[in-house]
Every structure is written in C-alpha cells, then in structure tokens.
Image (cartoon, rainbow, N blue to C red):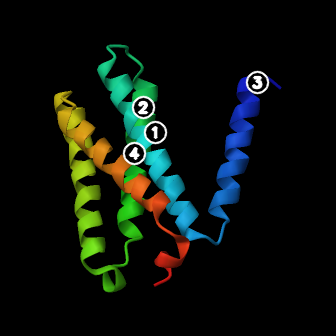
C-alpha cells in the first residue's frame, strides 16, 4: 500500500470513528476543523491560477455541505441568541463562499474564515460541562 493510500485509509477510519462518537462536542469540533480546511483549500485552488477544477470544486462543495450541517444542527429553542448569532455567521460564510465563486474576490471569504477560526478556538476552550447546561 502506498503511503498516500495509507494516510487516506487512516483518515477514513478516524472520520468513521468520530461520526459514531456519542460526543457532539467532538463532532462539532471536527466539523469546524474540516470546514476551515476546506474553505482554505478552496481559497488556495481558486486563487492560484491553476486550472485544478476538480480540487477547487471538491473543496467548494464540501464547504457548503459542512456549513449547511452546522446550520441544521443549531438548537434555536434552547440556544437563544447564541444559536441566532451562529446561524448568521454560518450564513455570512456561505454567502462569502458563493460570492467568491462568482467574483473571484476573496476578502469577504478571508473574513469569514477568520471568524470561523475564532469560533473553533472558543469551542475548543469551552469546558465540556458548560455544553450540558
């Protein structure tokens, strides 16, 4: 097995284990990590001047899919203002991603990525017992 296939197999096994996890805190953290990685990947391939349509499209589609997942799992009944604000941030990121696809301008998307990184860091710093309140 080539080293690339080995790495891909490891990542696949790791992802499957996380999805089967009963800990939503871990799953949301993984979604944030993957979203940021995918948005940065799209940013790289879309602005690099290379005609890597497949890679650019894959990162773009996965970014949109993850944003939808994050928006869909918000609990507006119990989350109140925090859920509303997160929805707005996710929607902003989605809109900036769509706009960058049309215009090839990335300033708004860079701002969205920065916001998502800050949220991810806050999420990581949050004690697990805070999430059960």
SS at mark 1?
A: helix
Relative to 92, residue 109 above or below: above
- According to the picture, the residue beneath numbered tag 4 turns out to be 63
> How many circles with numbers are drawn on the protein?
4
The answer to whether the residue labelled 4 contacts the one labelled 3, judged by CB atoms less than 8 Å apart, is: no
N-term-proximal mark, 4 vs 1 = 1
Identity of the residue drawn at 54% across and 54% down: 30
Spot occupied by residue 4 in the image (x, y as percentages of width and height): 71, 25
The image quadrant where one finds the N terminus is top right
- According to the picture, the residue beneath numbered tag 3 turns out to be 3
Q: Nearer the viewer, mark 4 or mark 1?
A: 1
Marks 1 and 3, how far apart at CA: 21 Å
The answer to whether the residue labelled 4 contacts the one labelled 2, judged by CB atoms less than 8 Å apart, is: no
Relative to 66, residue 75 above or below: below
Q: 43 left or right of 124?
A: left
Crowd tier of the residue under label 4, counting other residues whose Cα lies within 10 Å: few below 14, some 14–19, many 20 or above: many
SS at mark 2?
A: helix
SS at mark 4?
A: helix
Determine which quarter of the picture holds residue 91: bottom left
The answer to whether the residue labelled 2 contacts the one labelled 3, judged by CB atoms less than 8 Å apart, is: no
Spot occupied by residue 65 in the image (x, y as percentages of width and height): 41, 52
Spot occupied by residue 34 in the image (x, y as percentages of width and height): 49, 46
Crowd tier of the residue under label 1, counting other residues whose Cα lies within 10 Å: few below 14, some 14–19, many 20 or above: some
Q: 118 left or right of 9?
A: left
Marks 4 and 2, how far apart at CA: 9 Å
- According to the picture, the residue beneath numbered tag 2 turns out to be 41
Marks 1 and 2, how far apart at CA: 6 Å
Spot occupied by residue 122 in the image (x, y as percentages of width and height): 40, 58
Marks 2 and 3, how far apart at CA: 21 Å
The image quadrant where one finds the C terminus is bottom left
- According to the picture, the residue beneath numbered tag 1 turns out to be 37
């Amino acid at each position: 097995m080539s080293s690339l296939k080995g790495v891909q197999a490891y990542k696949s096994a790791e992802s499957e284990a996380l999805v089967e996890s009963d800990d939503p805190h871990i799953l949301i953290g993984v979604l944030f990590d993957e979203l940021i990685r995918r948005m940065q990947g799209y940013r790289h391939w879309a602005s690099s001047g290379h005609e890597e349509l497949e890679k650019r499209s894959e990162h773009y589609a996965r970014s949109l899919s993850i944003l939808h997942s994050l928006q869909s799992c918000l609990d507006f009944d119990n989350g109140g203002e925090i859920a509303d604000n997160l929805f707005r941030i996710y929607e902003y990121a989605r809109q900036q991603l769509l706009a960058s696809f049309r215009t090839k301008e990335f300033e708004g998307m860079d701002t969205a990525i920065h916001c998502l990184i800050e949220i991810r860091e806050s999420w990581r710093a949050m004690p697990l017992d805070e999430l059960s309140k």
